[in-house]
Image: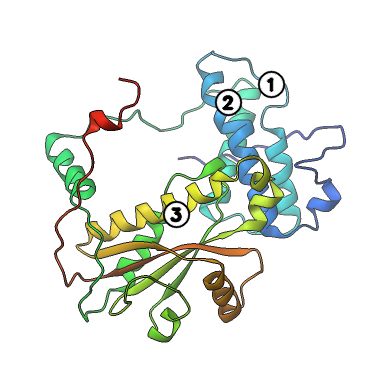
Amino acid sequence: MIFYSLPVKFLSEPLKVHGFTEEELMEVDPVVLRAIIHERTHHTIEVNMYRIMAGKRGMPPNFGEVAGFLLDVWKRRGLPTDAPDIQWCLNYIGFARMLRVGGDLDLGTKFPVPFTDDEMKTVDKLIFERRSIRQFKDKPVSDEMIDKILLAGLYAPHGCNVGCTRYLVLRDPEEWKLVRSDIPIENCVMIVVLQDMRMYKALRFDEYVPQNIYYDAGAAADHICLMAHAFGLGACWLTHGEETQRRLREHFGLHDEMVSRNHIVVGWPDEAPVKSQRMKLDEAMLNK
């Protein structure tokens, strides 16, 4: 993938983005600015670009300029541009610029192709054989495994690509006590999934799409459990309430807007429970 860095023509009129003036954007918390850049890149470029390229809609005259303006603010503040998510934004801003000037884009991407039969067997094993495991052997889980599991959670579907998912990784049994859980916790790594609500509130998602908050956390937990299963580990996804949220914030000195949503215990299985079953598919289909 080529990271385009073509100059961006900025709008001549004074601009507000999600209610923030340029002066306010120069002062706002970088966490908030980053979320706004993500969301505007997604909604004003990514969502529209492929329909424009396919000739299914016209190109707005200022296509990509708002996101470019925001990235310019980011750079003028001296904030780093080497993170993958910021590079993704830079890419799309460059794509929009190329389309505006009539350039040809070579995205280097491919359409999805069906998995082979052998690959589908692996997918089936991953999805249909995963079980919730609640007892674990006294055997360490490597940092490399945990890192890959956490990365899988970050790559879960995420509403508007806001990027608010954060983690706490608890290995100390004393820290496990901070989390109220309905199962005994031992011999595991506890992964706490949190969300930075500053990002949601700046975009007013807490007002307009509050359900995204919970979907995002749930999708992250699901990916975490699946990657753990792929490593031969066991995992169980659990939720907790406001008291646990408060204890975690106080213990780790987190921002008041950092809210934990769920926790997943991960370890080497010390039980082999019978796989739970679901209703028949035709019972779940409501519009047969």
Whether pointer 2 and pointer 1 mark residues with C-beta atoms closer than 8 Å, the reply is yes
Q: Is residue 184 above or below residue 51?
A: below
Looking at the picture, which amino acid does disc 3 mark? Answer: Leu
Q: Is residue 45 above or below residue 170?
A: above
In this rendered view, identify the residue nearer to me: 149 or 134: 134
Q: What element carries label 2?
A: helix
Residue 51 visible in the shown view: yes
What residue sits 40% from the left and 32% below the top?
A: 109
Looking at the picture, which amino acid does disc 1 mark? Answer: Pro
Which label was assigned to residue 60?
1
Q: Residues within 10 Å of mark 2 (few under 14, many from 20)?
A: some
Q: How crowded is mark 1: few (under 14 residues within 10 Å), some or many (20 or more)?
A: few
Q: How far apart are marks 3 and 2 (CA)?
A: 24 Å
Q: In which quarter of the image is residue 188?
A: bottom left
Which label was assigned to residue 21?
none
- Nearer-N-terminus badge (1/3): 1
Q: Is mark 1 on a helix, strand or loop?
A: loop
- Nearer-N-terminus badge (2/1): 2
Image position of 110 (left or right of 208): left
Name the spot of residue 238 as percent of width and height, x first. 39, 63
In which quadrant will I find the C terminus?
top left
Q: How far apart are marks 1 and 3 (CA)?
A: 32 Å
Which label was assigned to residue 154?
3
Name the spot of residue 152 as percent of width and height, x first. 37, 55
What residue sits 60% from the left and 41% below the top?
A: 209
Image position of 13 (left or right of 244): right
Image position of 201 (left or right of 14): left
Name the spot of residue 135 as percent of width and height, x first. 23, 73
Q: Quadrant of residue 30?
A: bottom right
Residue 155 visible in the shown view: no
Q: How far apart are marks 2 and 1 (CA)?
A: 10 Å
